[in-house]
Amino acid sequence: MTDPQDVYRRTTPGSRALHERAVRAMPGGTTRTTTYFDPYPLYIDRGEGCRTWDVDGAERIDMLGNYTALILGHAHPKVVEAVQRQVARGTAFAAANPVSATRGRRRPCSRCGWRGPSPAGPRSPASRVGTTAPTTTPR
């Protein structure tokens, strides 16, 4: 019987090389424990829709979608267009900006029933990142 790790090692030399380089730069080679597995993580070069290509050129179906954060898939044309438009205007301002105030026409918070802070003040700030909500809500 063929050992799956032997097949993995034989077909992913680019991932192995990148991981060896990464572990010289940081302990474990990654800050995302969910992407690491033995003998080394798979390194993805690009994605389109539900498909990804690893650094060795193998095409794969992305069954995780970044743990459901990519419901439109990788590199959806409308998302790429919106990101390019905003990057040309600037990113990561250390101040309020019109985009964060309006969220465009869709206003996702109001679609979910959120109508604004309670009379006692905001209890849980809105979060754009999955790890922020559980770390800030208890505070």
Image (tube, rainbow, N blue to C red):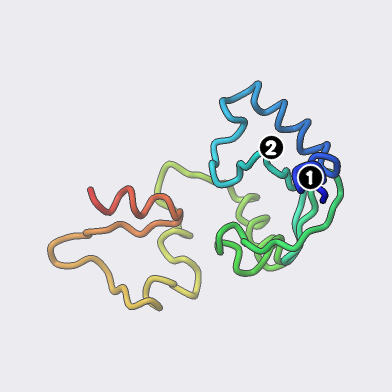
Q: Residue at x 66, y 64 (%)?
A: 63
The x and y percentages for residue 40 are 68, 37
**The one of 28 and 10 positioned closer to us in this rendering:** 10
Residue 81, percent from left and from top: 69, 62
Q: Which mark is residue 55?
A: none
Name the residue at 55% across, 41% down: 32
- The residue wearing badge 1 is 8
Q: Earlier in the sequence, mark 2 or mark 1?
A: 1
Q: Are marks 2 and 1 in contact (CB under 8 Å)?
A: yes
Q: Residue furthest top?
A: 24
Residue 107, given in percent of the width and then of the height, sits at 44, 72
Amino acid type of the residue that numbered disc 1 sits on in the rendered structure: Tyr
Residue 8: image x %, image y %? 78, 45
Residue behind mark 2 = 39
Disc 1: CA contacts within 10 A as few (<14), some (14-19) or many (>=20): some
Residue 112 appears left or right of 10: left
The residue nearer to you, when weighing 116 against 4, is 4
Left or right side of 132 for 29: right
Mark 2 is surrounded, within 10 Å at the Cα level, by few (under 14), some (14 to 19) or many (20 or more) other residues, namely few
